[in-house]
Amino acid sequence: MTYVITSPCIDIKDGACQDVCPVECIYEGGRMMYIQPDECINCGLCLSVCPVEAIFEDDATPVAEAAFKAANAEFFGPAVTGWGAPGGASPDFVSALDHPLVVRAPHGTTVVP
């Protein structure tokens, strides 16, 4: 099991999740944060501090947000950042890029069609 960041994070990027993550597996994209699933240790600290309730256990992700399971993982792949598993968030791993699902999301809303 891993955690997934979903649409309520789009255009919010509060960052509290990054602050509490003990393994620094939460990375900043252009419009939202992303969890690197291979680095996540499933501690749930991020879930407990997210002010917009955007984080879910992968197997508890609402059906309407299910596409974000793949979006979080694919953000790190060759089609978006190409970072793979960088080993911890740092200023070197901040991107203006986003997964296509997020790029297509309308601004000013957390609902992704």
Image: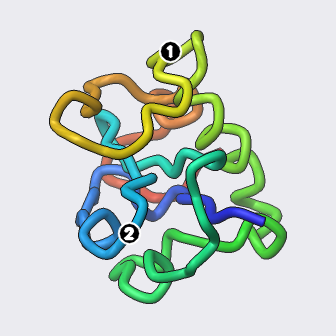
Q: Which residue is mark 2?
A: 21
Element under disc 1: loop
Q: Amino acid at mark 2?
A: Cys
Looking at the image, which residue sits at the far top? 78
| Residue that appears at 31% across and 52% down | 108
Residue 61: where, in percent of width, then height? 74, 68
| 57 displayed left or right of 79 | right
Residue 82: which disc? 1
The three-letter amino acid code for the residue at tag 1 is: Gly
Crowd tier of the residue under label 1, counting other residues whose Cα lies within 10 Å: few below 14, some 14–19, many 20 or above: few
User: Does residue 96 lie above or below 35 as drawn?
Assistant: above
Tell me the CA gap for discs 1 and 2: 22 Å
Q: Quadrant of the N terminus?
A: bottom right
Q: Position of residue 43 (x, y in %)?
A: 57, 79
The answer to which quarter of the image holds residue 40 is bottom right
Please state the horizontal and vertical placement of residue 72, each as a whole percent of the image.
Answer: 59, 43
Colour scheme of the rendered structure? rainbow
Number of marks in the rendered image:
2
Q: Residue at x 46, y 22 (%)?
A: 83
Around disc 2, counting alpha carbons within 10 Å, would you say few (fewer than 14), some (14 to 19), or many (20 or more)?
Answer: some
Image disc number at residue 46: none
In the displayed structure image, the side of residue 30 where residue 75 appears, left or right: right
Q: Nearer the viewer, residue 31 or 47?
A: 47
Circle nearer the N terminus (1, 2): 2
- The spot of residue 66 in percent (x, y) is 77, 54
Q: Quick one: SS at disc 2?
A: loop
Outermost residue on the left side: it is 91
Seen in the picture, residue 74 relative to 62 is either above or below; the reply is above
Quarter of the picture containing the C terminus is: top right
Q: Residue at x 49, y 36 (%)?
A: 102
